[in-house]
Image (tube, rainbow, N blue to C red):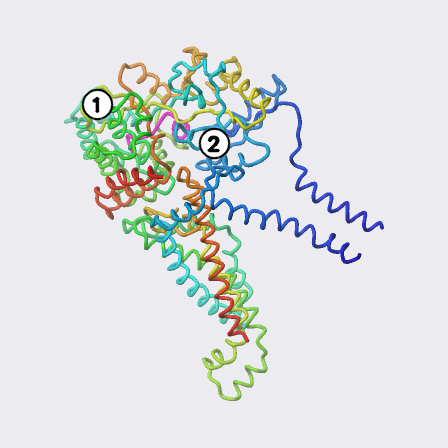
Amino acid sequence: MKNRIIAVMLTGVMLFTFFGCGKKNNTPSVYFLNFKPESAAAYEKIAKEYEKETGIRVKVMTASSGEYESTLKAEMSKSDVPTIFQLNGPVGYTTWEDYCYDLSGTALYGYLSDQSLAIQKDGGVYGIPYVVEGYGIIYNSAITDKYFALDGAKFASMEEIDSFDKLSTLVTDMTAKKEALGIEGVFASTSLAAGNQWRWQTHLLNVPLYYEFATKGDNTTLEALDANEIEFEYEENFKNIFDLYINNSVTQPQLLGSKSVDDSMAEFALGRCAMVQNGNWAWSQISGVSGNTVAEEDIKMLPIYTGIPGEEHQGLCVGTESYIAVNAKAEQKDIDASVAFLEWLFSSETGKSYVTNELGFISPFNTFNDDEKPTDPLAREVLSWLDSGKVSVDWMFAAFPSEGYKDAVGGALLEYSGGNAKWEDVALAVRERWASERQR
Amino acid sequence: MTKVKNFCIFLLPTLICFFIAFILPFFMGLFLSFTDFRTVTDATFVGLKNYKEVFSGGEFLSSLWFTVKFTVVSVISVNLLAFLLALGLTRGIKGTNLFRTVFFMPNLIGGIVLGYIWQLIINGILYPYGQTLLSSANYGFLGLVVLMNWQMIGYMMVIYIAGLQSVPEDIIEAAHIDGASGWMRLKKIIFPQIMPSVTICTFLTLTNSFKLFDQNYALTDGGPSGKTKMLALDIYKTFYNKVGSEGVGQAKAVVFFIIVAVIALLQLYLTRDREA
């Protein structure tokens, strides 16, 4: 008899460990699935602060780099679902449409300085951007100034560079004089290792495709989303800039397949090259390299010129791929708590100071004053280009058909730079894969 | 009554675990391959559409071909080398135990780590020649074979050693006295005696090569342009990297399961036959 009781208890314990996890309670809670691994520590702090102030528990989980979609898919299938998650743009919205809560009535939506930035459908608002970022060609003005001081320099200052022709002349001449400048190449390695191709197959490709769709309508992202095929009209311009990158680089073109983004940021930070294409998020990568020789005041940014007519009025590529969404399938009390948490984060004094100082975001909300803007040199450059009256290139790569499309283009670029494929193969990948991925 | 009690104590917990961790996901997966879904708890039925897409795109078939090539080469090389090492290390030479340990050690390192280590090594070797691992699909193929060998040989060697040690000394001695040469002894006496080990080793290498994922993911990630993408990686990429293709990825996984099961059963049947 005693044995039977023990047996029943043991089985009970085991069953409990399996099924006992789905406990229910009535206090609202927030579960935030974070997209940016670099912000994980800051969000943990924010969550603690918020719990101290309001008593509402905020659980923060961070997906590892490049694994957000798979983490989100897994978490959404559990009983304890994320209440706040992130969309990468209109394409992400098509995947998660059923899970996005309509935020049109919230104060958070009201805070947006430009409400057209939000992801909207049929009068509902489903995704709200919370950070604006910009990318271009980052350069070290100490090295370019050294060049301008040389005898026979073709330009006198970076202000003169406002087109691809001038950029190309500058870069090739700097390459010719690289010994005198003390650099190994003008550009940092064009990182083409697996998982490190996004600067080219996403960010760089954005420039020619933006111009292609800019003539078709106001919102390039929406135009591109509707397009079942592309012309790749500015193919030649994409080749211009890519060739310039790989032929004036620290690394020989056929060795680029072994280089990572970290490698190229380190090359820039150590002063082995003068320029690198990246965005304002890269500041921590530059300042964090030990032996960093680049002074904070020497870091400047230049738009990506590709030889498209009218580019002297072009600014940096500015946009966002970070939209916040609230899970419509969570319980109503958790939804309300989540919205309240987000409103606190982007409008209260404490919340805002975390956003500016810890997260370093350039926020698109009107709750932020001018003195609450981030102060790192790259963010300052992005803000000054935004104020310069030049036309920013929108981020429309959110409308690229899929990760598979980007991988195909990246693979073609790798084979092209290694000499194993012709440029036509790259152009083919850009065009054909777009059409074939869109068919589904 | 005691039977029921013993069943409850000893078998039921394991059965429940097995049901939750294997049977249930398996049938869920089977069901999901006929649906269009984003999360596994929320699916709509679409019939055979996913399976049509599996075979209409060339990617699945080209990964299948690459996987088959890789499996053939690595099954042969792993087993041959492991057997030779086992032969060498059962001769009682000095330091046998040390060598056995050293050869077994790579097996204790995870696939992802091995993949990144070998990526560095191979890139380091190719770099002076102006090439990288991703310059050609052949490098990726060879890299995977080398990696697989390095990792699996030690394990297979241990199984072969166990087999070799169980061959009775007196039979070998008798053959020796009857005048059988070393090669003849190996072929006619030792080999038939260790057939059970051969069965186990070919089974393990065959299924492991076919299902290889971590090493492939870390070493080349399918590059250049998906030319070194094996089946498991192709399934993963279909599932996560294409919008709305989760069902297709799941269908690929079902086809993959059928292929692996058929090959494994066929191989077991064939080698079992020779054991008798």
Instruction: Check disc 1 and give the amino acid type.
Output: Glu
Within the image, what quadrant is residue B164 found in? bottom right
Task: Look at mark 2 in the image and give the residue it sits on.
Answer: A37
Q: Where is residue B225 in the image (x, y as percent from the top left)?
A: 32, 46
Numbered label tally:
2
Q: What is the chain letter for disc 1?
A: A
Q: Distance between the residues labelled 1 and 2?
A: 35 Å
Q: Report the span colored magenta.
A: A273-288
Q: Is residue A158 left or right of residue B173?
A: left
User: Could you say which is closer to the camera, residue B174 or residue A32?
Assistant: A32
User: Could you say which is closer to the camera, residue B21 or residue B199?
Assistant: B21
Q: Which residue is drawn at 80% across and 56% down?
A: B1
Q: What is the chain letter for disc 2?
A: A
Helix, strand or loop status at disc 2: helix
Q: Is residue B179 left or right of residue B62?
A: right
Against A126, is B249 above or below?
below
Q: How crowded is mark 2: few (under 14 residues within 10 Å), some or many (20 or more)?
A: some
Do callouts 1 and 2 point to residues on the same chain?
yes
Task: Look at mark 1 in the image and give the residue it sits on.
Answer: A311
On-image quarter of the C terminus of chain A: top left
Q: Residue A420 carries which label?
A: none
Which of disc 2 and disc 1 is earlier in sequence? 2
Instruction: Check disc 2 and give the amino acid type.
Output: Pro
Camera sees residue A344: yes
* Residue A233 sits inside the magenta stretch: no
